[in-house]
Image (cartoon, coloured by chain):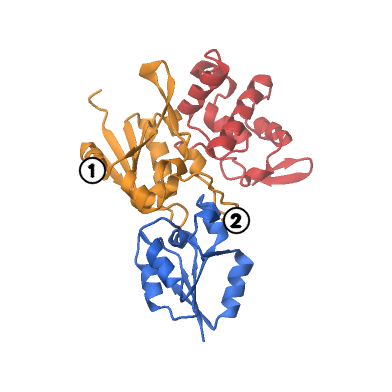
């Protein structure tokens, strides 16, 4: 299974998470988002970039509770809450945004 | 005839390193790899024993395994030498046989 | 609150040579979702898991030591490290990574999560736990 970006194929697992984290590009993020029925905008990019930075620093994709708490801390309570985050990513802010960010499935998600 | 001995277990967790040293002949080499690299650390309860054995056998650690564990080569006991992967191959080639202490 | 149990994860193995250290950390992260009182204990070769400056580029294995620094986000506030185990291995507290948590009861002030304790205190911490998980 693979995504197609600019004529290149990028392998992913049965749930859509890319196999090789180094394959990620912003263009790929747009492709994954489209497959998830999500239109990327500034608000969604902010979360995706936040997740990539979190992974870069801690080497894990955070659980949803941790993600929302960390967003609250850095971007403020108007964004760091369940309602806002689930509006951006209806199938789960951690699960879905991590997929778009090219990260593994968050630890602790089944 | 000389032997290259490799040890891949922490000396604080198993007897592999001490047993290896007790069986090594003068002129042999002991290469500590994986968790074995902890055996090369100075300032531990084992340092004195290692220094004593180091008089008769050459002691080496695999540098990438040392770096993975956050250990600066400056922490090694004097006389313990770091080798990279090609150095590991050279040691194997230089000795008549290789014996793994698991 | 009576449902909250004290969990203690006991780590006695060095990282990378075996899978125990990484598996323990994964279980801690998953278990943290259940909002129990979680502490980690590092003794014997387990203290090697927390050394600073780990760089696994040369061995083709993921460096998971940065993940310990995320434990504060997971509400893990106590990482007990046994002093005697450090000393036997030529290490001191200065050789360890820094891990902080934010104290809810003290205006979210950042506090160190690593506590170097004696072997006797470690024994007390073990005896004090409701559930001990060993790795």
Q: What residue is pinned by disc 2? A: C58
Q: Is residue C87 visible?
A: yes
From the image, state the color of chain C. Answer: orange
Q: Give the structural element (helix, strand or loop) at label 1.
A: helix
Count the marks: how many?
A: 2
From the image, state the color of chain A. Answer: red
Query: Who's the residue at 35% across and 59% down the image?
Result: B13
- Residue C39 spot, x, y in % from top left: 33, 36
Outermost top residue: A78
Badge 1 crowding class, 10 Å Cα cut-off, few under 14, some 14 to 19, many 20 or more, is few
Badge 2 crowding class, 10 Å Cα cut-off, few under 14, some 14 to 19, many 20 or more, is some
Query: Who's the residue at 60% across and 78% down the image?
Result: B93
Tell me: residue A12, above or below residue C33.
below
Mark 2 or mark 1: name the one nearer the start of the chain: 2
Query: Who's the residue at 51% across and 36% down the image?
Result: A106
Residues beneath discs 2 and 1 located on the same chain: yes
Q: Is residue B102 visible?
A: no
Quadrant, the C terminus of chain A = top left
Q: What residue is pinned by disc 1? A: C120
């Amino acid at each position: 299974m693979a995504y197609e970006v600019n004529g290149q194929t990028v392998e992913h697992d049965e749930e859509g998470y890319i196999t090789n984290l180094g394959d990620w590009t912003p263009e790929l993020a747009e492709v994954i988002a489209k497959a998830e029925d999500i239109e990327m905008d500034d608000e969604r990019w902010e979360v995706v970039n936040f997740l990539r930075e979190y992974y870069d620093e801690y080497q894990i994709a955070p659980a949803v509770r941790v993600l929302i708490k960390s967003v609250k801390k850095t971007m403020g309570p108007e964004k760091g809450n369940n309602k806002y985050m689930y509006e951006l990513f209806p199938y789960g802010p951690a699960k879905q945004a991590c997929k778009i960010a090219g990260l593994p499935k968050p630890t602790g998600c089944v | 005839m000389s032997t290259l001995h490799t040890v891949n277990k922490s000396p604080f967790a198993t007897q592999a390193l001490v047993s290896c040293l007790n069986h090594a002949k003068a002129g042999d080499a002991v290469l500590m790899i994986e968790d074995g690299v902890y055996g090369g650390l100075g300032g531990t309860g084992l340092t004195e024993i290692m220094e004593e054995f180091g008089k008769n056998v050459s002691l080496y650690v695999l540098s990438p395994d040392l770096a993975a564990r956050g250990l600066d080569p400056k922490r090694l006991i004097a006389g313990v030498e770091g080798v990279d992967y090609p150095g590991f191959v050279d040691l194997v080639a230089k000795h008549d046989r290789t014996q793994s202490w698991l | 609150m009576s449902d909250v149990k004290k969990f203690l994860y006991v780590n006695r193995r060095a990282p990378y040579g075996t899978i125990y250290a990484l598996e323990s950390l994964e279980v801690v992260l998953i278990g943290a979702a259940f909002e129990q009182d979680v502490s980690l204990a590092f003794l014997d070769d387990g203290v090697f898991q927390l050394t600073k400056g780990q760089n696994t580029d040369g061995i083709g294995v993921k460096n998971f030591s940065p993940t310990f620094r995320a434990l504060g986000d997971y509400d893990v506030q106590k990482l007990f490290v046994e002093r005697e185990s450090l000393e036997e291995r030529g290490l001191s507290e200065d050789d360890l990574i820094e891990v902080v948590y934010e104290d809810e009861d003290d205006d979210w002030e950042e506090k160190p999560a690593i506590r170097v304790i004696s072997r006797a205190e470690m024994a007390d911490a073990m005896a004090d736990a409701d559930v001990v998980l060993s790795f």
